[in-house]
């Protein structure tokens, strides 16, 4: 059964193959074939995902680590003991990520096959999309930080390529697009610096980059069963285990047990199985044995439990970075651990010139990780690239900049939950950044007119929700929101793409119409912006499917019951509430700011609905708009269904009235308990009716408010102004929002202008004037000339030439004498030879001749 | 004494023909004298116990090579070298050459009389040893070696070893690693196997058997005398013994009894009475105890119909009592009897646990005579394979060389090509073509190609 | 039994005679034949020593010497033929193009 996991490399190889085909042969293929290749590659990853999913379900959620043999040891530096295997980790977390990446990715491929119709670089677009999928899957499935980083950079590259995909659009739009791509790239590089620093620090501290070693056990259920039933008294010995920690969560623990009712059975089986394993497990041996668990599970005979399935028998260097960090953090002052290779490790980490306590190091690592996450997941201070990245084609915005890539930062932090769990301060910073981002982005979204910009800021805001959730330790809620958000934000983006497509189509239609009447009016064509919501209105009747799905997405994002957003957002809020009230964490109180952000979300989304779909058409283009083709609407419908039902993935316990018996179908805490097998510090939150009601009331109130302001055809007044803008009382608020809080301007003043000036100074003064003119001419040229003169005359002509010529003369003189011996007559040479022979023989006979 | 006279005659012949070869004005005469000289050398080779080389000398030298000489002389019509103008140019050459050769002869001759080559010892000949595994498969090992002084006497002899502490081996380890002086000879040495004849320096050698995982089963000292030929048999039913039997004759039949039983065995020949009850048995060996060897039996080669039975019970067998008969075998199933061979009677474990003797047939060691083609061939392919290959390559190269040297092909000079210079078009001109910008105005230009190529 | 020294001395005398032939004769073919004589004398010494030490290696060397001599004769005679074609002579004193 575990051989199923061996197909994991395919999930990367298949889209890579699609990339190669479309990249090299794409220009020769027609659109139909290119899109077929792209969609097949994407869909096949989804099939692979199904297999991996069933693998986990059939193997008691045991993580599998899959090597790609040809890349084994792809990075190996023996002198520093750096050996990084190419391993994919198939566990519940990575499979969760793979699941929505491949699924949403496939839908967006289908959508793009319609959306990109007629583009001159159609095949290349699919090549890039497939490449993105490959890198994203490397990112989520890599078992070491370096593979994660490879994927991280790869998706950044794809993002760059795709944002600037229309770099050759006319009238300066192309330039704007490529600038947006560069902005995204540079902002991400700043984040990558943090990521790299985190990786370096981790390697220096732990000597490995593996997240978990193959022999390690990360399954808290198994640990728990071991701790309670194990005959070796390991309970106290391994307090770093998730199992032992679990007890500390007070009331969450019963929920966990309740939710894991069907899992404890399998855990018990697993434990009894451990008796089959020899005690001296080491290295690969252990790996094989660990993978065998699932196979022999059916035998189920009881026996003494040995320490194998606990990590306590593993030496320090046999652990991945997370378990190492936990062990080090457990150490007291002055205590040391055997590394297993003869050296010891203690709390103090030596950095050459100075030493740092392990807690400080972990805090640093997590803060650097946070910097990386702010780049990739568009958080303050690096979020500015994401709104600009909307310059890319809409499928790209939906796939990369809403559903998948931007969640990589959150994924990385969830993956590193062990570290964040140990670093209180970092968690607080994470929360603050998340909440600030959620609030400010939500506020900015209120004042935008570009349909995709609104969604972009909304994405930033929702990512802030997830980051804040990570900060308060609600890893499950973060992952949950990530999934539901992937559904409804992809839906909204695709819907907006459909709208843009329709309006553009309508514009062309109207324009042609005009053309007949009034002649060619190119200027008009240039200024018309199909993404500007002021040019829309009343599209409800023109595009009914788009409207219906968009409405579902909006309600899901706004967090209305029973849409997906309600459940996930509510879980974040509930966990924050629990953290604040019950655990008394400061971070929890900060996270309560998310209520405001939630209300803002509902407000700006309803504003958008009013502006785009309701009221009456404000331009001819909107008048002439028409529904999109089926390849675009079908993904919309599928995503709408998921936005409606996605929330039931993780129904919290104790919801009473809200459930309508859906628990019976979907189960409680399905996602959380599933994730629990790989996210060690995940805890299952209980439903908080108060929070749910408050957030629901806030959302409904915001929608009603938005309806009052923008409803009944008041969305844009006759001067093209927003009602808030028109009203003097609210104008400053709107202006600040419309100006995006002046983030770009501040960055321009603070960084870009000084940077440009420094560069100009270096180029003009230092390089050109000083180096080229002065230094080159006076120092280098003159110096060389002087030395050259000195070398040429006295030294070269006098000494060297004299010596060489003298040798020549000497040779000629000697050879003049020697040439006489070369008579050219064979017999003379023969005599010379004979003389030599006789001499040699006589020499050899000398000892005999002397007696 | 005849040999000395013969040597003197051949020596005189050699020197005479060599001198005549040198002094003949006619090259054909020289060649003919040289042929006679070579035949003389072949005679010397015969006297020096090198018959094969003598034949090669006649065939290759006197035959092939000299024919080539004569052929070339005739072909060129160059019986006499023309010209001789330069003889006066080096007047010192002839005296110098004479002086050198005389000096050479004196020096070497003096060394010969001084050196006393014959007084030096010739190295002792190596002993030849073969090891035979004739213990049943479930025999177990003994740990200690027998004493080295048990060198057996001539003829039938024994050197059976007393019982020693046992090492119980797991059933899978009945194939041993055999090593001599620590060098592994065979990785899998099982029942019925025998090694090739090994040349060992005279002196004491250690033969050891070990299991595959390195557990020592048996280790024994073996004394090898110069030029001795030894068959070393690993025998015994429960503990392993070593039976060492020297081979003194290289003809006839040698039978070694490695069948562990308290009573001796006899081997009888039933002649043609395959199924006759009233058997008249010719005894091949009347009595042969465990560890003994019967050597040099002169038995006519051909069909055999033998029985092996308990010694001393010939009468009973002749009267039709089959109880003492341990084994019947005929050359229908076994190798032909009577050739020069070594037969080893070794025990075979039957399913009921009892043993019966079976016969393993091995070659008798026969030394190859010195200088024979066999001896040379063995040496050539054992130690001189690489030089042999190199010489073969040299011959091939010589053949090709001869063809190349004497090839009289027309020399066709290649037509001289006009110099074609290829100058890549600078990229700037492409850019200029497409943009219309004048990029190359200030750049240095290549000179125009002149129509007439430069002097070739 | 003839002592080995006798063979060696005979071999040496033949060698010296061959050397004289190489040095003093001007007919290239006779020079060549003298070389063969020298090789043969060396063979006699090898075989004599081989018997003396009871080692077959001397025989093998002789064997190789004969083989190499065959190759050498083939190439040498080919050279002589080629020279004769251009010079119409095989007098080695006329071959002094390499005079320094």
Image: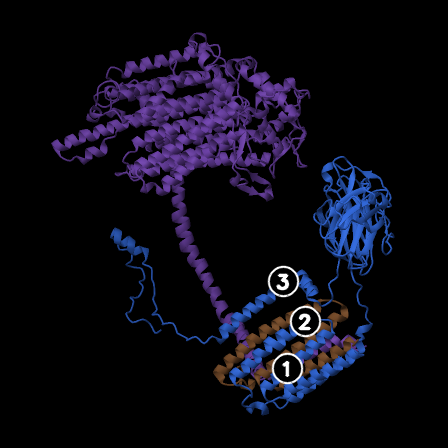
Chain colours: A purple, B blue, C brown
Q: Is residue C81 visible?
A: yes
Pointers 2 and 1 in contact (C-beta within 8 Å) = no
Query: Which circle's residue, 3 or 2, is located before the other in the chain?
Result: 2
Residue indicated by mark 1: B34
Residue A643: % across, % down: 38, 19
Q: Nearer the viewer, residue A772 or B146?
A: B146
Secondary structure under the numbered disc 1 in the rendered image: helix
Query: Which circle's residue, 3 or 1, is located before the other in the chain?
Result: 1
Q: Is residue C67 left or right of residue A430?
A: right
Q: Nearer the viewer, residue A90 or A423?
A: A90
Q: Determine the chain carrying the residue at label 1.
A: B
Residue B274: % across, % down: 74, 46
* Quadrant containing the C terminus of chain B in the rendered view: bottom left
Residue drawn 31% across and 16% down? A706
Which mark identifies residue B53?
2
For the residues labelled 3 and 1, the Cα–Cα distance comes to 32 Å
Say above or below: A737 vs B212. Answer: above
Query: Which circle's residue, 2 or 1, is located before the other in the chain?
Result: 1
Residue A846: % across, % down: 76, 76
**Mark closer to the observer (3, 1):** 1
């Amino acid at each position: 059964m575990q051989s199923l996991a061996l197909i994991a490399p395919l999930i990367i190889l298949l889209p890579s193959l699609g990339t190669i085909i479309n990249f090299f042969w794409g220009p020769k293929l027609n659109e139909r074939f290119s899109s077929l290749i792209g969609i097949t590659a994407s869909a096949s990853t989804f099939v692979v995902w199904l297999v991996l999913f069933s693998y986990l379900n059939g193997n008691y959620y045991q993580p599998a680590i899959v090597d790609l043999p040809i890349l084994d040891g792809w990075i190996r530096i023996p002198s520093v003991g750096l050996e990084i295997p190419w391993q994919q980790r198939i566990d519940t977390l990575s499979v969760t990520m793979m699941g929505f990446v491949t699924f949403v990715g496939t839908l967006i491929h289908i959508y793009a096959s319609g959306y990109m119709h007629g583009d001159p670089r159609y095949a290349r677009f699919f090549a890039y999309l497939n490449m993105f999928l490959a890198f994203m899957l490397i990112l989520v499935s890599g078992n070491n930080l370096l593979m994660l980083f490879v994927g991280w950079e790869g998706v950044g590259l794809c993002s760059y390529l795709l944002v600037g995909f229309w770099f050759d659009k006319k009238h300066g739009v192309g330039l704007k697009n490529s600038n947006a791509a560069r902005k995204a790239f540079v902002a991400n590089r700043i984040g990558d610096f943090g990521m790299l620093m985190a990786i370096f620090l981790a390697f220096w501290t732990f000597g490995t980059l593996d997240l978990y070693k193959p022999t390690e056990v990360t399954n808290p259920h198994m640990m728990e069963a071991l701790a309670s039933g194990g005959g070796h008294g390991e309970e106290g010995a391994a307090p770093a285990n998730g199992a032992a920690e679990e007890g500390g969560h007070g009331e969450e623990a019963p929920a966990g047990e309740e939710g894991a009712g069907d899992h404890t059975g399998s855990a018990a089986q697993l434990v009894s199985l451990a008796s089959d394993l020899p005690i001296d497990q080491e290295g690969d041996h252990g790996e094989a044995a660990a993978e065998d668990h699932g196979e022999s599970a059916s035998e189920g005979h009881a026996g003494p439990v040995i320490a194998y399935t606990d990590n306590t028998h593993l030496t320090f260097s046999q652990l991945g970075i997370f378990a190492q960090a936990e062990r080090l953090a457990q150490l007291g002052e002055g205590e040391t651990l055997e590394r297993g290779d003869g050296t010891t490790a203690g709390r103090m980490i030596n950095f050459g010139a100075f030493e740092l306590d392990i807690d400080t190091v972990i805090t640093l690592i997590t803060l650097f990780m946070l910097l990386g996450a702010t780049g990739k997941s568009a958080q303050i201070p690096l979020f500015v690239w994401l709104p600009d990245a909307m310059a890319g084609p809409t499928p790209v915005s939906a796939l990369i900049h809403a559903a998948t890539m931007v969640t990589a930062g959150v994924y990385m932090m969830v993956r590193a939950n062990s570290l964040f769990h140990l670093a209180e301060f970092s968690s607080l910073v994470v929360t603050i950044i998340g909440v600030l981002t959620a609030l400010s982005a939500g506020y900015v979204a209120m004042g935008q007119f570009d349909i995709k910009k609104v969604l972009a800021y909304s994405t930033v805001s929702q990512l802030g929700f997830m980051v804040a959730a990570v900060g308060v330790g609600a890893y499950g809620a973060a992952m949950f929101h990530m999934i539901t958000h992937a559904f409804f934000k992809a839906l909204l983006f695709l819907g907006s793409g459909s709208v843009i497509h329709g309006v553009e189509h309508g514009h062309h239609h109207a324009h042609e119409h005009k053309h007949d009447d009034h002649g060619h009016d190119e200027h008009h064509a240039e200024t018309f912006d199909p993404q500007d919501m002021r040019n829309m209105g009343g599209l409800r009747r023109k595009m009914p499917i788009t409207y219906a799905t968009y409405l579902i997405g909006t309600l899901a994002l706004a967090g209305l019951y029973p849409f997906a957003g309600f459940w996930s957002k509510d879980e974040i809020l509930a966990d924050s509430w629990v953290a604040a009230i019950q655990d008394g964490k400061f971070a929890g109180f900060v996270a309560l700011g998310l209520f405001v952000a939630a209300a803002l979300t509902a407000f700006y989304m309803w504003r958008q609905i009013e502006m785009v779909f309701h009221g009456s058409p404000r331009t001819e283009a909107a008048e002439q708009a028409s529904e999109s083709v089926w390849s675009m609407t079908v993904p919309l419908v599928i995503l709408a269904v998921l936005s409606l039902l996605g929330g039931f993935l993780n129904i919290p316990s104790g919801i009473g009235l809200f459930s309508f018996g859906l628990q019976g179908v979907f189960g409680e805490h399905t996602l959380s308990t599933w994730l629990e097998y790989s996210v060690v510090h995940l805890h299952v939150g209980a439903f908080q009716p108060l929070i749910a009601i408050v957030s629901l009331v806030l959302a409904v109130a915001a929608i009603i408010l938005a309806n009052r302001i923008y409803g009944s055809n008041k969305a844009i007044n006759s001067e093209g102004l927003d009602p808030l803008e028109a009203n003097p009382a609210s104008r400053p608020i709107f202006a600040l929002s419309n100006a995006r809080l002046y983030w770009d301007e501040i960055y321009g003043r603070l960084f870009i202008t000084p940077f440009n000036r420094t560069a100009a100074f270096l180029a003009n003064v230092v390089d050109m004037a000083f180096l080229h003119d002065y230094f080159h001419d006076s120092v280098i040229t003159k110096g060389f000339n002087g030395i050259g003169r000195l070398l040429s005359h006295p030294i070269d002509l006098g000494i060297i030439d004299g010596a060489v010529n003298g040798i020549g003369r000497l040779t000629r003189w000697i050879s003049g004498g020697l040439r006489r011996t070369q008579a050219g007559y064979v017999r003379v040479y023969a005599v010379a030879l004979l003389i030599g022979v006789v001499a040699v023989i006589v020499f050899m006979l000398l000892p005999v001749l002397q007696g | 004494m005849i040999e000395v006279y013969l040597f003197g005659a051949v020596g005189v012949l050699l020197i005479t023909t060599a001198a005549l070869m040198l002094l003949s004005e006619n090259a054909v005469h020289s060649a003919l004298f040289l042929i006679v000289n070579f035949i003389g050398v072949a005679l010397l080779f015969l006297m020096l116990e090198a018959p094969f080389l003598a034949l090669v000398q006649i065939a290759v030298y006197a035959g092939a090579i000299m024919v080539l000489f004569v052929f070339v002389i005739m072909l060129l019509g160059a019986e006499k070298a023309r010209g001789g103008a330069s003889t006066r140019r080096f007047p010192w050459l002839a005296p110098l050459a004479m002086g050198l050769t005389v000096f050479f002869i004196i020096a070497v001759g003096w060394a010969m009389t001084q050196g006393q080559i014959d007084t030096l010892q010739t190295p002792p000949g190596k002993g030849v040893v073969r090891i035979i595994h004739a213990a049943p498969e479930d025999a177990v090992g003994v740990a200690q070696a027998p004493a080295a002084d048990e060198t057996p006497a001539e003829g039938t002899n024994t050197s059976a070893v007393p019982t020693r502490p046992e090492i119980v081996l797991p059933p899978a380890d009945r194939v041993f690693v055999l090593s001599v002086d620590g060098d592994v000879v065979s990785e899998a040495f099982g029942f019925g196997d025998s090694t090739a004849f090994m040349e060992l320096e005279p002196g004491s050698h250690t033969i050891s058997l070990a299991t595959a995982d390195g557990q020592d089963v048996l280790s024994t000292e073996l004394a090898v005398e110069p030029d001795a030929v030894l068959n070393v048999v690993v025998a015994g039913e429960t503990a392993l013994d070593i039976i060492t039997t020297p081979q003194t004759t290289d003809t006839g039949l040698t039978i070694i009894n490695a069948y562990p039983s308290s009573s001796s065995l006899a081997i009888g020949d039933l002649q043609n009475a395959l199924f006759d009850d009233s058997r008249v048995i010719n005894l091949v060996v009347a009595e042969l105890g465990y560890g003994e060897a019967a050597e040099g039996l002169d038995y006519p080669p051909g069909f055999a119909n033998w029985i092996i039975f308990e010694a001393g019970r010939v009468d009973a067998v002749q009267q039709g009592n089959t109880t003492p008969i341990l084994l019947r075998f005929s050359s229908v199933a076994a190798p032909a009897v009577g050739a020069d061979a070594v037969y080893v009677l070794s025990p075979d474990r039957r399913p009921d646990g009892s043993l019966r003797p079976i016969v393993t047939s091995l070659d008798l060691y026969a030394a190859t005579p010195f200088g024979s083609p066999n001896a040379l061939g063995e040496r050539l392919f054992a130690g001189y394979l690489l030089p042999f290959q190199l010489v073969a390559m040299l011959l091939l190269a010589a053949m090709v060389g001869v063809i190349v040297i004497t090839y009289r092909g027309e020399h066709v000079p290649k037509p001289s090509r006009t110099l074609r210079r290829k100058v890549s078009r600078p990229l700037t001109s492409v850019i200029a073509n497409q943009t219309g910008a004048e990029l190359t105005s200030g750049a240095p230009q290549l000179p125009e190609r002149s129509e007439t190529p430069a002097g070739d | 039994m003839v002592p080995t020294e006798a063979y060696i001395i005979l071999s040496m005398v033949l060698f010296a005679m061959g050397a004289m032939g190489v040095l003093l004769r001007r007919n290239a073919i006779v020079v060549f034949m003298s070389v063969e004589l020298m090789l043969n004398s060396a063979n006699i010494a090898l075989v004599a020593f081989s018997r003396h030490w009871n080692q077959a290696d001397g025989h093998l060397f002789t064997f190789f010497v004969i083989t190499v001599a065959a190759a050498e004769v083939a190439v040498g005679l080919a050279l002589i033929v080629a020279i004769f074609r251009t010079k119409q002579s095989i007098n080695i004193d006329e071959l002094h193009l390499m005079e320094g």
